[in-house]
C-alpha cells in the first residue's frame, strides 16, 4: 500500500511561478536573484498557511542553483537542486524558534554561520516563528543579523510581526504576505482534484475556500478531510454535511419567506436551523453576509465582490431584484445589532426570533428617514389581512362625525405631550425660535445684523420666543394650582433634580449647576437656593418662573415660592475637603494619629 502524503505537503510549490496568490512578492524575490542583489536578511510575515516558509525554501533553492533558467527559476537538475529535493543540502538550515528560543540556540546558529558553503554560493538560514525568541536571544542575534558573512542570508518568518523587536525589524527587508483570494484557492483545489482523479462540484470547492479563510494550507487540509468523507466524489451536499456548514439554501429560503410576508414559515425554518445544532449568532452572521451579497449583486460594478460559484450568482441576482436597497440596509443593521447583543442576551432564541420579525417589518417600511424619525407602525405578523396605515391620516367624507380636531392656540404652537417638559425647552431650541420669528414677521429676506446689535437682538427674540412658548405650553403646565398639600425636604429635592434631569441638551450648563445646588426648605413653603456668583444667579433667574411652576405642580402646593441669593463670604469659603486634607487637619490636632497609622499599617482609601 502506497504511503499517503497530505496534499499540503505533496503539492507544496517548488518554484516561484507555482506559488498561489503572492505574485508581487515572488516577482520581487526573482528579480533580486536575477540581478545578483539579494539582501542579507528578510522578514516574511503574514497569516498562517499563505506561503511564507514555502517562499523561503524556494528562495534558498533558487539562489544556490548552479544553472538557473532564463525565467529566474531553479533548474532542478544540478547537484544543489538535487540535494535540496532529497533533503541532504547543507546550504539550507531551518530553525524552529518556537522550541529553540534560548540564547544557547542562537549561539549555536551563529557558529554555523561562520562556516562557508561547500556547494553553491550562499548558506540560507530560515528561522520560523521568530517572534517566539526570547529578548536575550534577540539581543544575541542582533550583531550577526546586522553584519553577517557575505555567504550568509537570513530569512525570518512570523505570524505576529508586532512581537518582534524594532531593532530586528530595522535590519530586515519586510515582506507582508496577504490572505489568498477565494478564486485563487478554488483554482488550486481544482488542479489538485484533477491530479488526484477526484470528481467535484464548483460550489463544493467554493465552500472549502471560504471555510479556509484565506489560508492555502487550511484549504488543502479541509480538502483531504472532505475527499475522505465523500470517497473521491466531492459534492456540495457532502461538504456541508462533513464541515457542518449552514447551507446557503436556508438563507435563500428564509429571505424568500420574509419577502412573501410569511413570518410563521420563516420562524419554522429558523426552528429547523436551530434543531440542527447551529447557534443563533451563527445563523445571524451568515444571514447578514447573505444580505451583503444581495446588496453587491444589485450593481454590475460590485458584482466581482460576490465570492460564490457562477451557478449561484444567478440565484443572488434573482433574489436581489426583489429587494429594495433601503430594506437591505435596514436588514444588515438589524442582523449586525443582533450579533453584537447575542452574548449579553438572557434569552438568545427570543432575540433571534425578534430580529427575524423586525426584518420582516422592514420589507414595506417606506416611511421617510429624516428629522426625528418616523412613527413606528407594526404590521400584522400572523395574518394575511391587508394593512391600511394611511386611511386614518387621510381626511375624507367617510370620517366619523364624532371626531373633531381641536383648535390650536397659535400657528406656532407645539403639540401637547404626556411628559412634563421644563419651560426652557421650547425657548432654548434655536430652530423653533427662528421658525416662530419667521412666521410672526411674515418675511423671507433678512438683512445682516451689525455685530454691535446682535446680542440685543438675540435677547429680544429669545424673550419673544419664551412668551410664545409659554402660550403654546400644554394646559397641564399653565393650570392654576389650588392644592396645599404638605411636603418634606426629600420631596423638594427629588423634584428639583428631576427638573434638572429633564432639561434639554442645550441647557446642560444649567442642569449641571442645579445638580450641585442644595435647596433649603424654610417656613411657609419658602424655598431658598444659595448660588455662587452673579453669573449663576442670572442663569437661575432665567428659569425662575418655570422652575417655580414645576415645583408647585409636582409638589401640589400653590404656596411654594422660590428665591435665589448669593452666598455670603463666610459661606463661600466653605468647601469639601479631600481625605488627605482631612487627615492632615486631624494630624495637626493629634500627632498620635500618625503613630496609630504606622502601627496598624493603615492607608487612606
Image (cartoon, grey):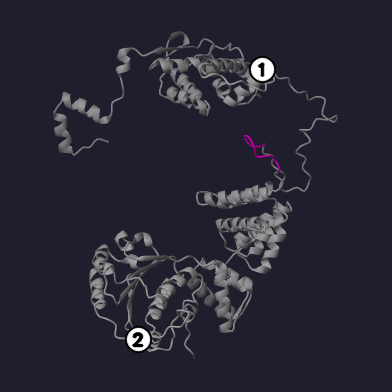
| Residue drawn at the location 54% of the way across and 21% of the way down | 424
| Residue drawn at the location 25% of the way across and 78% of the way down | 112
The quarter of the rendered structure image containing the C terminus is top left
Q: Is residue 369 magenta?
A: yes
Q: Secondary structure at mark 1?
A: helix
Q: Nearer the viewer, residue 484 or 81?
A: 81
Stretch in magenta: 366-374
Residue 289: name its quadrant: bottom right
Judged by depth in the image, the label closer to the viewer, 2 or 1, is 1
Residue of label 2: 88
Q: CA distance from mark 2 to mark 1?
A: 96 Å
Categorize mark 1 by other alpha carbons within 10 Å: few (<14), some (14-19), many (20+). Answer: few
Q: Secondary structure at mark 2?
A: loop
- Residue 42 horizontal/vertical position (percent): 36, 69
Q: Is any atom of residue 521 visible in this view?
A: yes
- Residue 510 horizontal/vertical position (percent): 46, 23
How many marks do you count on the picture?
Answer: 2
Categorize mark 2 by other alpha carbons within 10 Å: few (<14), some (14-19), many (20+). Answer: few
Query: Which of the two labelled residues, at mark 2 and mark 1, occupies the earlier sequence position?
Result: 2
Q: Which mark is residue 466?
A: none
Residue 425, above or below 302? above
Residue of label 1: 441
Residue 43: name its quadrant: bottom left
504 with respect to 432 (left or right): left
Q: Nearer the viewer, residue 567 or 27?
A: 27
Asked whether disc 2 touches disc 1, contact meaning CB atoms under 8 Å apart, the reply is: no
470 with respect to 101 (left or right): right
Q: Is any atom of residue 243 visible in this view?
A: no
Amino acid at each position: 500500500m502506497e504511503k499517503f502524503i497530505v496534499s499540503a505537503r505533496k503539492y507544496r510549490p517548488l518554484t516561484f511561478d507555482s506559488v498561489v496568490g503572492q505574485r508581487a512578492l515572488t516577482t520581487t524575490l526573482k528579480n533580486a536573484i536575477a540581478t545578483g542583489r539579494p539582501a542579507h536578511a528578510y522578514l516574511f510575515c503574514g497569516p498562517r498557511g499563505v506561503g511564507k516558509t514555502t517562499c523561503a525554501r524556494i528562495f534558498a533553492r533558487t539562489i544556490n542553483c548552479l544553472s538557473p533558467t532564463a525565467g529566474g527559476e531553479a533548474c532542478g537538475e544540478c547537484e544543489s537542486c538535487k540535494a535540496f529535493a532529497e533533503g541532504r543540502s547543507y546550504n539550507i538550515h531551518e530553525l524552529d524558534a518556537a522550541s529553540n528560543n534560548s540564547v544557547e540556540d542562537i549561539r549555536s546558529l551563529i557558529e554555523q554561520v561562520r562556516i562557508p558553503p561547500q556547494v553553491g554560493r550562499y548558506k540560507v538560514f530560515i528561522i520560523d516563528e521568530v517572534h517566539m525568541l526570547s529578548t536575550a536571544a534577540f539581543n544575541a542575534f542582533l550583531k550577526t543579523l546586522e553584519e553577517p558573512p557575505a555567504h550568509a542570508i537570513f530569512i525570518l518568518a512570523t505570524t505576529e510581526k508586532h512581537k518582534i523587536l524594532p531593532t530586528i525589524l530595522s535590519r530586515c527587508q519586510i515582506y507582508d504576505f496577504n490572505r489568498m483570494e477565494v478564486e485563487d484557492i478554488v483554482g488550486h483545489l481544482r488542479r489538485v482534484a484533477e491530479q488526484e482523479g477526484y470528481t467535484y462540484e464548483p460550489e463544493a470547492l467554493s465552500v472549502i475556500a471560504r471555510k479556509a479563510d484565506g489560508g492555502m494550507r487550511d484549504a488543502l487540509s479541509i480538502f483531504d478531510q472532505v475527499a475522505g468523507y465523500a470517497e473521491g466524489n466531492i459534492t456540495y451536499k457532502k461538504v456541508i454535511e462533513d464541515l457542518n456548514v449552514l447551507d446557503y439554501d436556508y438563507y435563500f429560503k428564509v429571505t424568500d419567506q420574509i419577502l412573501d410576508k410569511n413570518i410563521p414559515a420563516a420562524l419554522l425554518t429558523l426552528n429547523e436551523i436551530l434543531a440542527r445544532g447551529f447557534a443563533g449568532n451563527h445563523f445571524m452572521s451568515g444571514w447578514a453576509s447573505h444580505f451583503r451579497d444581495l446588496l453587491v449583486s444589485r450593481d454590475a460594478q460590485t458584482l466581482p465582490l460576490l465570492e460564490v460559484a457562477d451557478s449561484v450568482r444567478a440565484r443572488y441576482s434573482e433574489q436581489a431584484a426583489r429587494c429594495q436597497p433601503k430594506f437591505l440596509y435596514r436588514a444588515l443593521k438589524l442582523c449586525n445589532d443582533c450579533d453584537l447583543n447575542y452574548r449579553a442576551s438572557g434569552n438568545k432564541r427570543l432575540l433571534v426570533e425578534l430580529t427575524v420579525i423586525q426584518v420582516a417589518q422592514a420589507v414595506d417600511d417606506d416611511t421617510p428617514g429624516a428629522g426625528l424619525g418616523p412613527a413606528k407602525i407594526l404590521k400584522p405578523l400572523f395574518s394575511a389581512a391587508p394593512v391600511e396605515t394611511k386611511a386614518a391620516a387621510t381626511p375624507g367624507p367617510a370620517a366619523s362625525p364624532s371626531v373633531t380636531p381641536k383648535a390650536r392656540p397659535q400657528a406656532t404652537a407645539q403639540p401637547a405631550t404626556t411628559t412634563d417638559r421644563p419651560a426652557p425647552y421650547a425657548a432654548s431650541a434655536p430652530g423653533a425660535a427662528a421658525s416662530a420669528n419667521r412666521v410672526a414677521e411674515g418675511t423671507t429676506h433678512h438683512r445682516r445684523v451689525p455685530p454691535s446689535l446682535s446680542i440685543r437682538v438675540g435677547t429680544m427674540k429669545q424673550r419673544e420666543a419664551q412668551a410664545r412658548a409659554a402660550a403654546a405650553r400644554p394646559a397641564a403646565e399653565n393650570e392654576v394650582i389650588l392644592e396645599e398639600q404638605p411636603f418634606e425636604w426629600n420631596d423638594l429635592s427629588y423634584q428639583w433634580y428631576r427638573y434638572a434631569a429633564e432639561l434639554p441638551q442645550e441647557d446642560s450648563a444649567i442642569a449641571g449647576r442645579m445638580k450641585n445646588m442644595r435647596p433649603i426648605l424654610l417656613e411657609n413653603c419658602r424655598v431658598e437656593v444659595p448660588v455662587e456668583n452673579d453669573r449663576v444667579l442670572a442663569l437661575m433667574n432665567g428659569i425662575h418662573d418655570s422652575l417655580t411652576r414645576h415645583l408647585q405642580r409636582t409638589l401640589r402646593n400653590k404656596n411654594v415660592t422660590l428665591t435665589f441669593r448669593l452666598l455670603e463670604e463666610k459661606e463661600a469659603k466653605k468647601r469639601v475637603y479631600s481625605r488627605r486634607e482631612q487627615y492632615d487637619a486631624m494630624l495637626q490636632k493629634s500627632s498620635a494619629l500618625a503613630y496609630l497609622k504606622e502601627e496598624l499599617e493603615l492607608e487612606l482609601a
